[in-house]
């Protein structure tokens, strides 16, 4: 029993900590924060300025591949000047998205939506690919675990019975055996009838493998943000600066008491994950560049990368991310960047559906709010 407890903790450490947000580092153990009503409009710093986006005039060199749109590329200001997010305006949480810096990207094609269950199933059928969640963990990964505890599975969001201390994310994430992309919410769940939903429970290598098979690749973080901004300058969201223009949500995010069972009121039209393309596209014709599911991008995660680019004083041309990962808050885990937020993002805990902000994840971790989309170079 003792070894089993260690095994569970070890798994949660890899699979949950990697997809959680580093709020526990920012609060003292004695201070408790529970779900409450928070301000919808974040505090914006005046220290950094967004300069005008300069969109390339180059027309699409060819007809866009099926399900993709042309992103012309250009020069833009990347990052966020939001001082606070989540936990009711704790300062400094978004520091890894600062400072704002100038970036140039060449044109490319991008998937209009996140890759769907239907599309991923076609890949698996053609190749026989087995995702990380379907692979049995090894003794090398977890040397203290009993053999019977080394089971396939992944992490799922598990709502709490009542309001809880938001400093302890272990309360609403669970490692469940038999969970994978075909059973995204546990072994009894299915994707039948959800062919048009985004595929989830995807680790980085699972996304990269699909992209290679499809003749595409994962976007860089700079390409992802340029596309999400839709040629606009400095907006808070992919659709503008107001969370609910005309009183309507523009993305599938979480409303209500987080992370309480049945706490999501579904004011945006969905409780939990939604099919792709349910909200208006951005100016480039891209859907769900905020909310629904987090998306893997190709860059290693480094908390200081934006500072390094800004300090050069130059426009970063087609940046590929740092040469290595770096997260002082969690130095043992190898991470790449997530973008876009998910259906679990809420002003009570994580507002990283804001277009300039970032997420991060251990490369062999998956969850039921994590997917991806692809790009194709010209």
Image (cartoon, grey):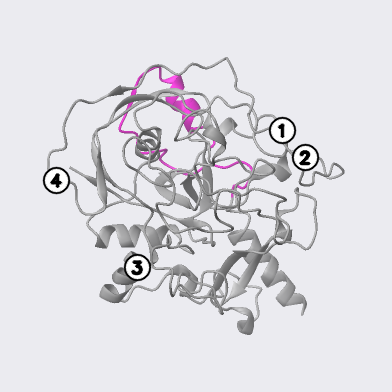
- Left or right of residue 331: residue 211: left
Q: Residue at x 51, y 40 (%)?
A: 358
Residue 267 spot, x, y in % from top left: 60, 49
Q: Which residue is mark 1?
A: 90
- Foreground mark, 1 or 4, reads 4
Q: Earlier in the sequence, mark 2 or mark 4?
A: 2
Q: CA distance from mark 1 to mark 3?
A: 40 Å
Q: Which portion, as a residue range, is magenta?
A: 303-331
Mark 1–mark 2 CB contact (< 8 Å) = yes
Residue 314 spot, x, y in % from top left: 36, 19
Q: Is residue 179 above or below residue 196?
A: below
Q: Earlier in the sequence, mark 1 or mark 2?
A: 2
Q: Earlier in the sequence, mark 2 or mark 3?
A: 2
Mark 1–mark 3 CB contact (< 8 Å) = no
**Could you classify mark 1 by the number of other residues whose Cα lies within 10 Å: few (under 14), some (14-19), or many (20 or more)?**
some
Q: Earlier in the sequence, mark 1 or mark 4?
A: 4
Q: Which residue is mark 2?
A: 27
Location of residue 60 (image quadrant)? top left
Element on which disc 2 rests:
loop
Element on which disc 1 rests:
loop
Residue 279 spot, x, y in % from top left: 44, 47
Disc ID at residue 118: 3
Quadrant of the frame with the N terminus? bottom right
Q: CA distance from mark 2 to mark 4?
A: 51 Å
**Could you classify mark 4 by the number of other residues whose Cα lies within 10 Å: few (under 14), some (14-19), or many (20 or more)?**
few
Q: Which residue is mark 4?
A: 63
Q: CA distance from mark 4 to mark 3?
A: 23 Å
- Foreground mark, 1 or 2, reads 1
Q: Residue at x 50, y 26 (%)?
A: 307
Q: CA distance from mark 2 to mark 3?
A: 42 Å
Q: Is residue 60 magenta?
A: no
């Amino acid at each position: 029993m003792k070894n089993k407890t260690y095994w569970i903790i070890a798994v949660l450490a890899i699979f949950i900590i990697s997809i959680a947000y580093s709020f526990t580092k920012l609060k003292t153990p004695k201070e408790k924060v529970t779900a409450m009503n928070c301000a919808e409009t974040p505090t914006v710093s005046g220290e950094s300025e967004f300069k005008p986006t300069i969109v390339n005039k180059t027309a699409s060199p060819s007809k866009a591949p099926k399900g993709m749109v042309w992103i012309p590329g250009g020069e833009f200001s990347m990052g966020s000047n939001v001082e606070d997010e989540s936990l009711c305006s704790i300062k400094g949480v978004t520091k890894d998205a600062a400072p704002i810096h100038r970036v140039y990207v060449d044109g490319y094609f991008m998937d209009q939506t996140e890759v769907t269950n239907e599309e991923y199933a076609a890949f698996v059928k053609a190749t026989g690919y087995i995702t990380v969640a379907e692979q049995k963990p090894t003794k090398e990964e977890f040397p203290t675990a009993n053999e019977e505890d080394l089971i396939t599975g992944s992490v799922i969001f598990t709502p709490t019975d009542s309001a809880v201390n938001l400093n302890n994310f272990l309360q609403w994430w669970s490692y469940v055996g038999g969970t994978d992309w075909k059973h995204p919410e546990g072994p009894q769940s299915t994707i039948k009838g959800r062919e048009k939903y985004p595929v989830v429970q995807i680790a980085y290598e699972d996304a990269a493998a699909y992209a290679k098979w499809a003749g595409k690749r994962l976007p860089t973080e700079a390409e992802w943000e340029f596309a999400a901004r839709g040629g606009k300058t400095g907006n808070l969201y992919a659709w503008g600066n107001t969370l609910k223009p005309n009183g309507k949500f523009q993305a599938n995010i979480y409303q209500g008491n987080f992370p309480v069972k049945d706490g999501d009121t579904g004011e945006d039209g969905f409780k939990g994950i939604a099919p792709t393309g349910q909200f208006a596209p951005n100016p480039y014709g891209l859907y769900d560049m905020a909310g629904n599911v987090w998306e893997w991008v190709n860059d290693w995660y480094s908390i200081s990368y934006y500072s390094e680019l800004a300090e050069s004083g130059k426009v970063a041309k087609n940046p590929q991310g740092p040469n290595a990962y770096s997260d002082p808050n969690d130095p043992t885990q190898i991470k790449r960047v997530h973008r876009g937020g998910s259906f679990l993002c809420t002003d009570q805990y994580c507002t990283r559906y804001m277009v300039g902000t970032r997420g991060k994840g251990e490369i062999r971790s998956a969850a039921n709010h994590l997917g991806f989309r692809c790009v194709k170079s010209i």
